[in-house]
Amino acid sequence: MSTPAEDRTAIEELLARYNEVTDEEDWDAWAGCFTDGGAFQGAYDRFTLPDELDRYVEHASGILADWPNLRHYMTNIRIAVDGDRATCRSFLLMTSTKPGELPANVMAGTYDDELVRTAEGWRFASRTVTLDGAVAREATA
């Protein structure tokens, strides 16, 4: 059995992996951050994984067309572990860098996560994005 500190470290690794594979556009690895039937409530739409992975990839491709070189950053990470379940709240900042331009902030908000321990490690049962304000972008789906 792991200690609470080991659980928090493992969850922080999941958060970092999520950001890394998202920014690398490794969509199978992105879906692997979720449980089967896990839900991602993004800024524009909700997706259940792995069943709606193709729809999510189409959605994400539209965002990346508008905002190239997207980077995800998380701060103020608060994790609460209760046995094989956990919750996490963190701040989100996303930047985009177009060729020849300086990076621009394109989104800010929070992630609210529900996590479960699986045989493969900690995974998101649900991940919800709440933006701080309006985003100048048409929703794609």
Image (tube, rainbow, N blue to C red):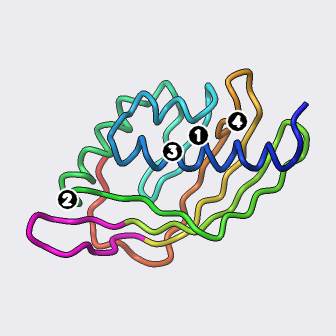
Q: Please, what is the three-letter code of the amino acid marked with disc 4?
A: Trp
Whole-number angstrom distance, CA of label 3 to CA of label 2: 21 Å
Tag shown at residue 39? 1
Whole-percent x, y for residue 77 in the image:
67, 64
Q: Nearer the viewer, mark 2 or mark 1?
A: 2
Residue 18: which numbered mark, if any? 3
Is residue 99 shown in magenta?
yes
Question: Tag 1: Cα neighbours inside 10 Å, few (<14), some, or many (≥20)?
Answer: many
Q: CA distance from mark 3 to mark 4?
A: 12 Å
Residue range highlighted in magenta: 95-107
Of badges 4 and 1, nearer the viewer stands 4
Circle 4 — which element? Answer: strand
Q: How would you rate the neighbour count of disc 2 (Cα within 10 Å): few for under 14, some for 14-19, many for 20 or more?
A: few
Q: Which quadrant of the structure image shows residue 79?
A: bottom right
Image quarter (top left, top right, bottom left or bottom right) of the N terminus = top right
**Can you say whether 132 is above or below 125 in the image?**
below
**Residue contact at pointers 2 and 1, CB within 8 angstroms:** no
Which residue is painted at 77% across and 33% down in the image? 117
Between 8 and 46, the one nearer to me in the picture: 8
Find the distance from the CA under tag 1 to the CA under tag 3.
Answer: 14 Å
Are circles 3 and 4 on residues that touch, CB within 8 Å? no
Which amino acid type is shown beneath numbered disc 1? Answer: Ala
Q: Earlier in the sequence, mark 1 or mark 3?
A: 3
* Distance of label 2 from label 1 (alpha carbons): 24 Å
Front of the two marks 2 and 4 = 4
Amino acid type, callout 3: Tyr
Whether 62 is among the magenta residues is no
Query: Looking at the rendered structure, which numbered label has been put on residue 122?
Result: 4
Residue 63 left/right relative to 132:
left
